[in-house]
Image: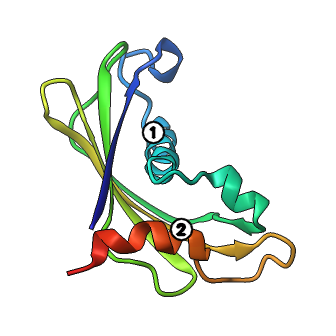
Amino acid sequence: MYESITQVRVRYAETDQMNVVYYGNYAQYFEVGRVESIRQLSYTYKDMETSGVIMPVVELNVRYLRPATYDDLLTIKTHIRELPTDHRIEFHQEVFNEQGKLLTSGKVLLYFLDLATRRKTNMPDILREKLAPYFEG
C-alpha cells in the first residue's frame, strides 16, 4: 500500500457563514492530496499530461464526520491500496485536524485516458515503476 501525507491550512474563503469549511471544498483538499502524493514519488500530473495521459475523476464518495474551520491546519492522508492493473486508479483519503481527529474520509476513482483520443489507457509505465515497490511482498 502506498501512503502519502500533506497539509493545507483552511483559508477564510473556504468557509461559510458558520465559519465551517464549505463541504464542496473537500474535493479540492482531496485533489491536493492526490497531486502531492504523486509528486512525492518524484513524478507529477504535469509530467503525466506531457506524456499524453490525463486522469479525470469519474467517481467521488465523501463522508463528513466533523467540521474544519478557518485557519485549521489539516492533514490529508492519501492511500493507494491496490496497484492499478488497467485504466483505473482509486485513492482513499482522510482529512484530520491538528488534534488528530478524523474530519472527513473519501474515495476517489480516476481513469487514465489518452490525451489525444480520450480513450481509456493503462497507467503510465513510469508511474507503475514508482508505485510497484510499495506493493511487493
* Image spot of residue 39 (x, y percent): 51, 47
Query: Residue at image x 80%, y 69%?
Result: 115
Disc 1 and disc 2: Cα gap in Å? Answer: 22 Å
Query: Residue at image x 37%, y 14%?
Result: 70
Quick one: quadrant of the N terminus?
bottom left
Residues at discs 1 and 2 in contact (Cβ within 8 Å): no
Query: Residue at image x 43%, y 40%?
Result: 26
* Image spot of residue 123 (x, y percent): 58, 76
**Does residue 114 appear to the left or right of 21 in the view shown?**
right
**Does residue 119 appear to the left or right of 92 in the view shown?**
right
Question: Residue at label 2?
Answer: 127
Amino acid carrying label 2: it is: Leu
Q: Residues within 10 Å of mark 1 (few under 14, many from 20)?
A: many
* Image spot of residue 32 (x, y percent): 49, 41
* Corner quadrant of residue 87: bottom right
**Does residue 135 appear to the left or right of 30 in the view shown?**
left
Amino acid carrying label 1: it is: Tyr
What secondary structure is found at the residue carrying circle 2? helix
Which of the numbered marks, if any, corresponds to residue 128? none
* Image spot of residue 46 (x, y percent): 69, 51
Viewer-nearest residue: 46 or 17: 46
Figure coloring: rainbow
* Corner quadrant of residue 58: bottom right
Question: Residue at label 1?
Answer: 29
